[in-house]
């Protein structure tokens, strides 16, 4: 067992084993909900495959916990394929997970729009097709900090991923077919927008060093979830100012209808205390109501993180009756749990 | 040796071992470049992938033709790297391998064709153009330099030295570029002023090929 | 509105208003579960008072979120009284909350054993008695890092608080009388032991500075939950070594019976990523099984924190059939939620 | 003035305002002392409490006897401070107030009795003994010094100066002590070598009383 670098203030053994050891711990903590295939390197629903149910598979780099492993279970994902920290999983894992949870009704891949994720899931879907499993891929790209243009890899997938996994998971659970499960996931992505800021960097276990240094009194604006710097730096503002900074680009990029009901997902990046996150939620809630929006569903917590990064992201989803019903439907995973 | 002389299968193994050693030695530097405009994992990714390749090839029987070894190397990268560079380098080596086919040796012209196929594979999968601040910006000039040298009848080592120099230069040339592909593109103008990690590791890979062929010769 | 010190990497407005603004945000995020009385400064169950039900009131300094406000709701607390960050609440708040949630069946105060908490709750209980409300106080003191002797203020109340609030809350919900609700809470405290370590300090909003500096490669061993330094400093160990460091004092202070079923509560101090916390859980789970203990109930997450402190605490509760039944009973709060 | 001369109600108000100013000025220092062996909030706690007391007393009519004002001050501390120091100082001032009763002025002997009652109240609630590294270690020597001075017929200011000096000395004397009460006791031997924040603020409070009486005289 390699010794932890003495400078790394982390709870781990061999830094190169952190993902595998963490997944083993997740499975040990939630044996009723999930199982971990250490051989093929994926987390699956304890009762997978569920015959006749459309199966949902997602995955991506690790370091965003509880995403995705914490969302495996009844009413959400059938399997999650975690790559190394901030590194997309490999096609082999994705293929193995796809086969393991296929219940004969088709498999949906929920893929965050990052070059690596897209390529690896694409290769896995091709292999699955060779094995006679038809896979429908849904791309999530809700981050308005990145313009979707020829000059970028396209918008990143961030907070909407959690909402799409929950809502599509509920659709699959109630027996919808592959096409309509994929369709509702895409509808979530179309109706959701996100924006995030960081007050500190995070420390990937491999390097043990912060990815960037943020001078005192500065914040990174327009960040993703991989500890990467944001679009720009600005002087650190008050919670009220930061709330405005989050709300404005989100409602500008896709203005919800006047008086629309919205799901407000205020996400902590990992290192921000709940005391601060709820304070920020109060500011966001007020700003939305000022804009004639009704926060009729709310999710506040650290659900799609960058390790211990301090900061927050806002995801706004314009609801409709079906999306509300699917959001409220029971979910039974390590990180999201309600209903029976 | 001249471009006429043939390169043997074990040269591929030597090449891959040289790459494993090079990305291992440069791992921290590559990761640091990736931290500046990406997510700080490129060095670890390449190191993980090529040490797996080294292991995979060590297990192969000596009779396998070079093309087959490259296909195995490419598949190994796809299965172990992840990220963007895994599928991209996986495609590159598999295409190169297919281009060499089952011949048990290859000459300069065949090497040019194989590396061109590799670049084409990367472009097909990643749709990057020169100037997008990616590995392409190191690989394209390298292949062009190699082709010129071979066409001019230069000895293969000499042509490969020119190719490796061109790759280094191409990598350095990514510094002033604004990224249009991959993670770095999220930074917009903030990506300017940093050298692209993938282009940097690509130059290491071409340099390793030069060393491998020289050792064979 | 005071300007946030430019050096403070926190999401807040006026540092002196952080607790009030955060509670307002909590209530805005969970209007179905809780309401916030900004006048009297407490958080209560949305449907309080519940007539005929024993009411549970807890409280303490803020900065430990989700404790206590996040545990208000059906099956757990009727009210929480948050003081300023790391400062016990004042008797006025506690009295007001006690009156507001009294359903006529008696009120239980769950008090963590800190000088300030004990004194302020005592004064409030005396005032409540004057108003004809009989209050039963339950003291929680599970932290084995502190010897319970004449030379200390006695053991601190830490992780067992969460377990006592959940289990006593379930007892009250099923209709137990005040004496038996208090008795089961005390039984939890008697059968539970805790120990914690820190890898970093935290930053109270008032000062904006870390409470202590931890040199590289060091950890604080035997910490409480107020960002205070621990009993001693040690070189930072691997997750495996730290797991042993947590398990050993807990099972030594109160050895559970061989083969006993235990509830394992592995708590994050706030700044430790889930990736690391689950990895540590895997190590703890294995060490307990080696000792012939059965982790039949598990709670892994940041539930009783010190703001953004990095670190973890272990609480072990030896279960019996009633404790298991009460733990599994439905709970419906912002931070803990299962069953219907 | 001599110990025979009486201290008026407004002296209490002046005292509390002096305390508010002093703990406000020393807030950061008190918090820093508390960070070392406690939880880093003592300065903020005292500042919050005594600025509330200042407000509360400002609203009172000038006719109220000193004892009543001290009771109001004590209740205000209990209602605004929290922590350990809120109830403790609240009890102290309430006890002092009750001891003064409704007399509209008090002399040195009455002041000694009032402060002794305050200390007794703190001990009753907190059960601390001298040497436990608490506010007691500043207050007990202060009251003793005051008593000696008054008994010796010294002028009150002079006796109060001795009391304030004794409180400062008592606070400094907590440095080598190992805490046996309050949060600091959790640190065991690690509490040695730090000055107790509550003893330090207690010394500020006695010094403020000296100033208040001097101004009245
Ligand atoms: N679309 C693309 N085409 C070609 N190369 C690319 C593309 N996207 C990224 N790259 C290369 O991949 C490198 C990053 O690789 P790596 O850090 O291993 O993967 P990731 O970006 O997924 O973390 C970049 O420096 C760039 O050279
Ligand atoms: N039992 C006690 N008796 C007397 N004084 C005490 C006792 N416990 C604590 N104190 C005093 O209270 C001070 C700490 O006050 P403060 O920091 O405001 O409260 P808390 O410790 O609750 O944060 C200590 O420095 C000590 O002087
Ligand atoms: Mg990556
Ligand atoms: Mg990278
Ligand atoms: Mg305190
Ligand atoms: Mg304190």
Image: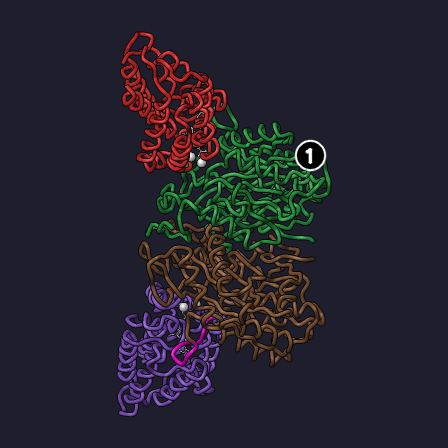
Chain colours: A green, B red, C brown, D purple
**For the N terminus of chain D, which image quadrant?**
bottom left
Whether label 1 lies within 8 Å of ligand 1 gets the answer no
Answer with the quarter of the image where residue A181 lies.
top right
Q: Position of residue A300 (x, y in %)?
A: 57, 50
Q: Nearer the viewer, residue C231 or B43?
A: B43
Q: Is residue C187 left or right of residue C309?
A: right
Is C155 a magenta residue? yes
Span colored in magenta: C148-156
Q: Is residue A226 left or right of residue B10?
A: right
Q: Nearer the viewer, residue A236 or C32?
A: C32
Q: Position of residue C126 (x, y in %)?
A: 56, 80
Report the magenta stretch's main SS. Answer: loop
Asked whether residue A136 is in view, the answer is: yes
Give the residue drawn at x 35%, y 51%.
A3
Q: Nearer the viewer, residue D113 or B138?
A: B138
Answer with the quarter of the image where residue C257 lies.
bottom right
Q: Is residue C96 above or below residue C238?
A: below
Q: Position of residue B141 (x, y in %)?
A: 35, 17
Q: Is residue A57 left or right of residue C147?
A: right
Q: Nearer the viewer, residue C237 or C153?
A: C237
**For the C terminus of chain D, which image quadrant?**
bottom left
Ligand 2 rendered quadrant: bottom left
Asked whether residue A286 is in view, the answer is: no
Is C100 a magenta residue? no
Give the residue drawn at x 35%, y 68%.
D37
Task: Rate crowding at label 1 as few (under 14), some (14 to 19) or many (20 or more) other CA atoms within 10 Å.
Answer: many
Please tell me whether mark 1 sits on a helix, a strand or a loop.
helix
Q: Position of residue B80 (x, y in %)?
A: 46, 35
Q: Chain of mark 1?
A: A
Q: Is residue A86 above or below residue C75?
A: above
Residue at the disc numbered 1 = A178
């Amino acid at each position: 067992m390699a010794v932890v670098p003495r400078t790394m203030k982390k709870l781990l053994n061999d830094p190169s084993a952190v993902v595998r050891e963490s997944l083993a711990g997740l499975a040990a903590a939630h044996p009723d909900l999930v199982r971990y295939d250490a051989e093929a390197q994926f987390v699956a629903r304890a009762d997978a495959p569920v015959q006749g149910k459309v199966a949902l598979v997602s995955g991506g780099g690790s370091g965003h916990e509880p995403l995705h492993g914490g969302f495996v279970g009844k009413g959400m994902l059938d399997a999650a394929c975690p790559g190394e920290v901030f590194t997309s999983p490999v096609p082999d894992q994705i293929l193995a997970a796809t086969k393991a949870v296929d219940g004969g009704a088709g498999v949906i891949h929920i893929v965050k729009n990052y070059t690596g994720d897209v390529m690896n899931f694409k290769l896995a879907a091709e292999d699955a097709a060779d094995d006679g499993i038809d896979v429908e891929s849904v791309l999530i790209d809700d981050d308005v900090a990145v313009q979707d243009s020829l000059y970028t890899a396209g918008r990143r997938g961030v907070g909407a991923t959690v909402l799409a996994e929950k809502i599509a998971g509920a659709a699959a659970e109630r027996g919808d077919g592959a096409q309509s499960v994929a369709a509702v996931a895409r509808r979530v992505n179309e109706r959701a927008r996100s924006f995030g800021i960081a007050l500190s960097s995070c420390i990937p276990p491999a390097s043990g060093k912060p990815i960037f240094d943020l001078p005192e009194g500065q914040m990174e604006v327009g960040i993703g979830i991989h500890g990467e710097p944001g679009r720009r730096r600005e002087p650190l503002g008050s919670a009220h100012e930061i709330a405005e900074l989050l709300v404005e680009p989100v409602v500008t990029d896709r203005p919800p209808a006047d008086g629309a009901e919205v799901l407000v997902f205020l996400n902590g990046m990992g290192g921000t205390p709940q005391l601060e996150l709820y304070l920020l939620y109060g500011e966001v809630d007020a700003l939305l109501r000022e804009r004639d929006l009704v926060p009729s569903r709310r999710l506040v917590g650290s659900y799609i993180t960058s390790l211990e990064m301090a900061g927050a992201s806002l995801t706004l989803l314009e609801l409709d009756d079906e999306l509300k019903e699917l959001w409220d439907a029971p979910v039974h995973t390590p990180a999201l749990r309600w209903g029976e | 040796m001249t471009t006429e002389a043939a390169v043997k299968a074990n040269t591929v193994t030597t090449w891959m071992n040289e790459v494993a050693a090079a990305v291992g030695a440069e791992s921290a530097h590559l990761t640091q470049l990736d931290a500046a405009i990406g997510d700080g994992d490129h060095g670890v990714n390449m190191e993980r992938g090529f040490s797996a390749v080294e292991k995979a090839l060590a297990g192969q029987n000596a009779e396998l033709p070079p093309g087959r070894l490259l296909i195995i190397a490419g598949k190994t990268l796809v299965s172990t790297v992840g990220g963007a560079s895994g599928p991209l380098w996986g495609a590159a080596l598999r295409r190169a391998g297919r281009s060499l086919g089952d011949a048990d040796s290859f000459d300069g012209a065949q090497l040019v064709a194989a590396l061109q196929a590799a670049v084409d594979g990367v472009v097909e999968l990643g749709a990057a153009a020169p100037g997008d601040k990616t590995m392409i910006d190191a690989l394209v000039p390298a292949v062009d330099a190699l082709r010129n040298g071979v066409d001019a009848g230069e000895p293969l080592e000499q042509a490969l030295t020119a190719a490796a120099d061109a790759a280094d230069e191409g990598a350095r040339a990514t510094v002033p570029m604004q990224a249009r592909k991959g993670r770095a593109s999220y930074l917009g103008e903030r990506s300017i002023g940093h050298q692209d990690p993938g282009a940097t590791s690509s130059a290491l890979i071409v340099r390793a090929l030069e060393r491998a062929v020289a050792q064979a010769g």
